[in-house]
Amino acid sequence: MARQFNIYKGLQKPLIYKGFQGKFIGWGLGSLVISLVTGGVVGSMSNMALGGFICVTGFVGGLVFTANQQKKGLHFKTRHLGIFQFGNDFKNLTNGRKTQNGV
């Protein structure tokens, strides 16, 4: 008699953490690391208050940017707005035959 095992149904779903999905988790972590390094460098070079301000604004700005990009979807798709009309020139259609000028 064969043994039956439960199948985990969530394997094909993207990873979600604190509202961020898939690659956007990496984007959020990247904005955290970049803002910490930039704030630390600026704080050591000039003023700690300025470094802290740059760190906080960089992290919040990175998270806002990441959230806005996530609203567009997990995969980047070009979304064209408007109506497109494609013209056709049936006079130059030759069905593979050469035209009069030899081209």
Image: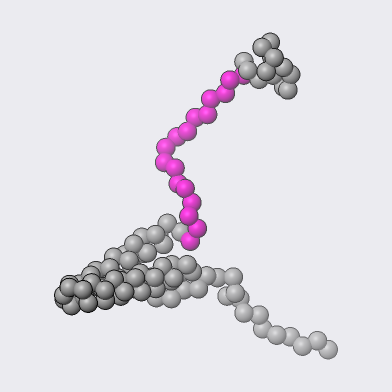
Q: Position of residue 42 (x, y in %)?
A: 23, 72
Quarter of the image where one finds residue 45 = bottom left
Please report the residue visible at 57 percent of the width from the left and 23 percent of the height from the top: 88
Quarter of the image where one finds residue 5 = bottom right
Q: Position of residue 27 (x, y in %)?
A: 41, 68
Total labels: the figure holds 0
* Residue 68 is at least partly visible in this image: yes
When the figure is inspected, residue 83 is found, relative to residue 29, above or below; the finding is: above
Please report the residue visible at 17 percent of the width from the left and 73 percent of the height from the top: 46
Q: Position of residue 81 (x, y in %)?
A: 41, 41
* Residue 51 is at least partly visible in this image: no
Of the pair 68 and 41, the residue shown nearer to us: 41
- Figure coloring: one colour
Please report the residue visible at 83 percent of the width from the left and 89 percent of the height from the top: 1
When the figure is inspected, residue 33 is found, relative to residue 86, above or below; the finding is: below
Per the picture, the main secondary structure of the magenta-coloured stretch is loop
Quarter of the image where one finds residue 89 = top right
**The furthest residue to the front:** 45
- Find the magenta span and give its range: 74-90
Q: Position of residue 62 (x, y in %)?
A: 32, 66
When the figure is inspected, residue 4 is found, relative to residue 89, above or below; the finding is: below
Tell whether position 64 is magenta.
no
Of the pair 92 and 17, the residue shown nearer to us: 92
Please report the residue visible at 47 percent of the width from the left and 48 percent of the height from the top: 78
Q: Quadrant of the C terminus?
A: top right
